[in-house]
Image (cartoon, rainbow, N blue to C red):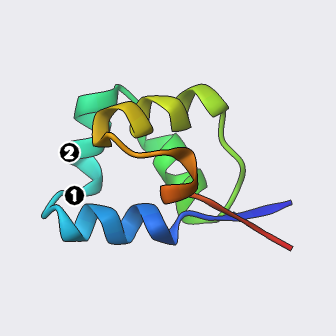
Amino acid sequence: MEFSYNKLWKLLIDRKMMKKDIMEKTGITGTTIAKMGRGEPVNLTVLGRICKCLEVNIGDIVDFVK
């Protein structure tokens, strides 16, 4: 299974944020960010924290790649 987090990366750029900023605000680790960078699945709780922080829905940050 592969996922695309390109929407998240673009959202961060649009908001002039860096990956380290989202890590600090949500408490997610560098390992999780690295997994997302490789398109690997991450815990739904992590995605929920990101959504809450950025005030978006899950579909705004991740896509399932068929």
Q: Which residue is mark 1?
A: 18
Measured Cα–Cα span from mark 1 to mark 2: 5 Å
**Picture quadrant of residue 12:** bottom left
63 w.r.t. 36: above or below: below
**Element type at marker 1?**
loop
- Which amino acid lies under the numbered mark 2 shown in the image of this protein? Asp
- Which amino acid lies under the numbered mark 1 shown in the image of this protein? Met
Q: Is residue 53 left or right of residue 14?
A: right
Front residue of this view, candidates 22 and 61: 61
Check contact, mark 1 vs mark 2: CB within 8 A: yes
User: Label 1 crowding class (10 Å Cα cut-off): few <14, some 14-19, many 20+?
Assistant: few
45 w.r.t. 40: above or below: above
23 w.r.t. 27: above or below: below
At 60% across and 52% down in the image, what residue appears? 35
Q: Which residue is mark 2?
A: 21
Residue 60 seen: yes
Q: Where's the N terminus, which quadrant?
A: bottom right
Residue 44 location, x and y as percent? 65, 32
Q: Where's the C terminus, which quadrant?
A: bottom right
Mark number displayed over residue 54: none
**Picture quadrant of residue 40:** bottom right
Q: Is residue 16 left or right of residue 65?
A: left
**Element type at marker 2?**
helix
Callout count: 2
14 w.r.t. 28: above or below: below
Front residue of this view, candidates 48 and 1: 48
Residue 50 location, x and y as percent? 41, 38
At 57% across and 55% down in the image, what residue appears? 59
Q: Is residue 64 left or right of residue 19?
A: right
The extreme left residue here reads: 16
